[in-house]
Amino acid sequence: MSDVQTDVRAYTLRLELVDEPGELLRSLRPIADNGGNLLSIFHERGNVTPRGHIPVEVDVEATPARFENIIDGLRDAGINVIQAGTERYSEGLTVILSGHVIDTDLSDTLSRIQESANATVTDLSVAAPEGTSNVSSARIDIAAERGATEVVLEKIRDVAAEKDLRVVEPLTGAAGA
């Protein structure tokens, strides 16, 4: 058996698709074009991501080089890749924003966080106990590429300062490290 065959691994891709006809098929094309072997698809049609898109989980087999080409192909096709195997988005963080979170355009805030540096919002919880025009809070779970956490936090700090929001940041670093 050749080295190429023995280097085939299983990977999980978590994608975020627009809810339009043909989007699932369009997202599968870069996998096929780059030599990925489709193992399974979990299309969460009844759920939506914080940005209103449909989450889709795809399991594929490929060599590491082909997998990188698959990721590049998906991005080139405009497909939002939330998770790619264990390497790409391997760091997770949770922040809390408080203040006039909704009044200052929460959708804009989320978009700007995701534009920061290879990060994506994976979960969002909003609390507005006195109504949306008063003080509210948002708990935001973010997946970031390894080593990008500080860049993402800096973007969150900048957006929060601009919108007069308070940021409760995660603890970073290991004790005794």
Image (cartoon, rainbow, N blue to C red):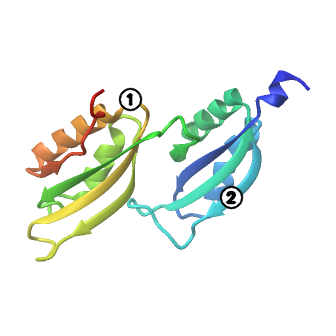
Which amino acid type corresponds to the residue marked 1 in the rendered image?
A: Gly
Image coordinates of residue 58 in percent, x first then y, are 65, 52
The secondary structure type at the circle numbered 1 is: loop
Left or right position of 128 against 61:
left
Query: Residue tagged by mark 2?
Result: 41
Left or right position of 5 against 170:
right
Look at 43% across and 35% down and name the residue there: 145
Mark 1–mark 2 distance (CA, rounded to whole Å): 29 Å
Binning the other alpha carbons within 10 Å of mark 2 as few (below 14), some (14 to 19) or many (20 upward) gives some
- Dot 1 or dot 2: first in sequence order is 2
Look at 57% across and 70% down and name the residue there: 45
Image coordinates of residue 167 in percent, x first then y, are 16, 49
Query: Residue tagged by mark 1?
Result: 147
The secondary structure type at the circle numbered 2 is: strand
Q: Of the residues tagged 1 and 2, which is closer to the observer?
A: 1
Q: Nearer the viewer, residue 51 or 144?
A: 144
Image quarter (top left, top right, bottom left or bottom right) of the N terminus: top right
Q: Nearer the viewer, residue 11 or 50?
A: 11
Q: Can you see residue 78?
A: no
